[in-house]
Image (cartoon, helix red, strand yellow):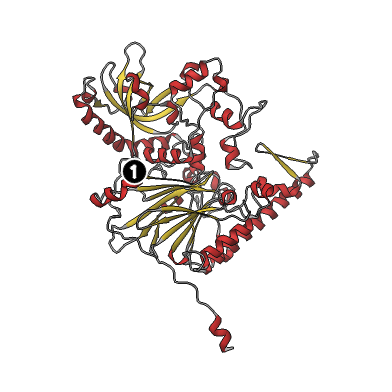
Amino acid sequence: MKAQQHQVRSPPTRAHIPFLPSWQRFHEFAAPKESSNSGGDAATTPAASQHHPYARQYSHIYAARLAALRDRCVSNAQRTLDVSSSSSENVGSAEVVEQIIEVKEGVWSVLVGTIVKEMDPKRRPLVNSSYGSCDTQSFLFPSVNGSDKEPAQESLRSYLFDSEKGDVLHLEDSSGRVEIAPMEIGDDREEHNFALDPNRVATGVVAAVIGKVSVEKGVMYVHSVHFAGPPVDALKLDRASNKQTSHEPTLLIISGLGCGADSPTDVSSGGSLALRREMLLEYLTQPKIGNGASFCRMIVAGGGVASPNQLERGNGEISNGGKTTRGNSHDDSGKSKSVNAARSSKLAESLRDLDIFFSEVLSSGIPVDYIPGWHDPTNANWPQRPIHSCLLPHSCSFVDLFGRSTNPFEGILSVGDDENANMRVLGSDGLNIADLRRFLAMSSSSKIEQNNNGTNGDSTPVEGTSSMDALHQTFRYGHMAPTGPDSLPTFPSSESDPFVMQTRPGIYFAGNCEKFETRLVDVNGDEVDEVDEANAMAVEGEQPVTRLVCVPRFAESGEVVLVKLNTLECEVVSFCDVRA
């Protein structure tokens, strides 16, 4: 017995980083408030209806968003006015107009409002885009009825802005709206950093525009557009003074575990998703395999359970372009009950697999934060509530290590002794990024119009925006979900917009992306060259930088992302169970 006791190995010592969750501000807007303690008829009383979120109008959230971002937009526009004060175009003489209705024609002005894209639906193909049983990829590039063309191209063209075919861009506030259009700025308009491109914005984005209203047409021709961007707050990380060590605290971010079913790539390649999860577990818990002692926290950015399409493949059902069809066409109540029971059983099995995986990671001493995703059993509208504790009983038994957060997620990691040496982490399961990508295109509006008007314009490929570019755009917007509630389903709110970036994050991520991408941006939201970044930070140690990360789906890529908190260095680790 004594010999056996000496063989028992204690778990490896983990790098401990104090963590302060701050996602509670999302939770306040994530569910209807309880009306009263009375009976079931209380919901029908006028007093109860005042507390219900859907008793409010969605217009209030746009007003709250504009009020929160207005000052930051004006401040960024003022910097351009200071630089342009000596230009021959007299742009520097523009004055800030408080309301759109007060703008004067023929005078350089600065207007702040919400961008609204009015696009004619008649010329667009009907696409099957819904928040139903399809996965993120089929939602982003849905199928097209009666068309054999590539779904990705048809979906992008259906949301493409084209002024030649009746699409109009407006800037709106509580007083009214004005039509806006890009101003021709010589031959280098496309290279103008602040030029207005309708295919680089979406409905709901708050911006300040500098331009003049035409006397003839009443259209404001925009010289430059300026977004709010994140604020520069007191949470700064002096990365120049942080030295890289052998056990530097590392944040692990993963998404798309897909418990309950193998991914489509596994079916064709013969791989096993469960085996890759076991490889990941060994990497986390065995110090000899990986640098497990340096992992201070693990964030799971949605996709913990497989999509309904993947779960239903084992029930004799066939997935076709986001739609689910069954071998037998009879639709009676008995079969409907059996199908629902099979779906519930499959979901329960997926949750059990997820619970067991989490409990094994937690037993090794690694804290885990779980962000609910699209297919998780929680509310569909953003912000999503934390998944209920009864669905993950084994994981929730680790009270001090397991965190059930909202979607989006936000928290603060203390990476140093100084109270200002904190790392704010902000991110989501990636649905906000996938939704925004439908309305953005890399090509400029002039190229798109030229391609559409040409003889072979319809066959010219449209370059869609990558997940990293869309994530970077939301960072410039200063807003995580600008397409909500117009396209992304959200709760209405009259007090404030929960998706406004109130503080500048040190790490900003999106899950369930098609591939790993990362980018480092400075205080102005511009990309930083990481080759010269170390020298720049040594001189300007107090300038905050932000690491943008697109986390790939683990079920399809087998990849996890590691971010070193002291230096913000980012790397990806891949797990493969199939020989190339």
Q: Amino acid at mark 1?
A: Val
Work out whether residue 237 or residue 52 is closer to the camera in this orientation and state it: 237
Residue 82 lies, with reference to residue 520, above or below; the image says above
Percent x, y of residue 235: 30, 53
Q: Farthest residue toward the top? A: 216
Percent x, y of residue 493: 44, 41
Is residue 61 shown to the viewer in this render? yes
Q: Is residue 328 left or right of residue 4?
A: right
Within 10 Å of disc 1 (Cα), the crowding (few <14, some 14-19, many 20+) is some
Q: Is residue 136 left or right of residue 117?
A: right
Percent x, y of residue 85: 20, 26
Residue 403 lies, with reference to residue 483, above or below; the image says below
Residue at horizontal 45 percent and vertical 61 percent from the top? 297
Work out whether residue 284 or residue 125 is closer to the camera in this orientation and state it: 284
Q: Secondary structure at mark 1?
A: loop
- Which quadrant of the rendered structure holds the N terminus? bottom right
Quadrant assignment, res 456? top right
Quadrant assignment, res 88? top left
Percent x, y of residue 74: 28, 33
Q: Farthest residue toward the left? A: 86
Residue at horizontal 34 percent and vertical 39 percent from the top? 526
Q: Farthest residue toward the front? A: 580
**Image label count:** 1
Residue at horizontal 41 percent and vertical 40 percent from the top? 472
Q: Is residue 345 left or right of residue 18?
A: right
Q: Residue at label 1?
A: 528
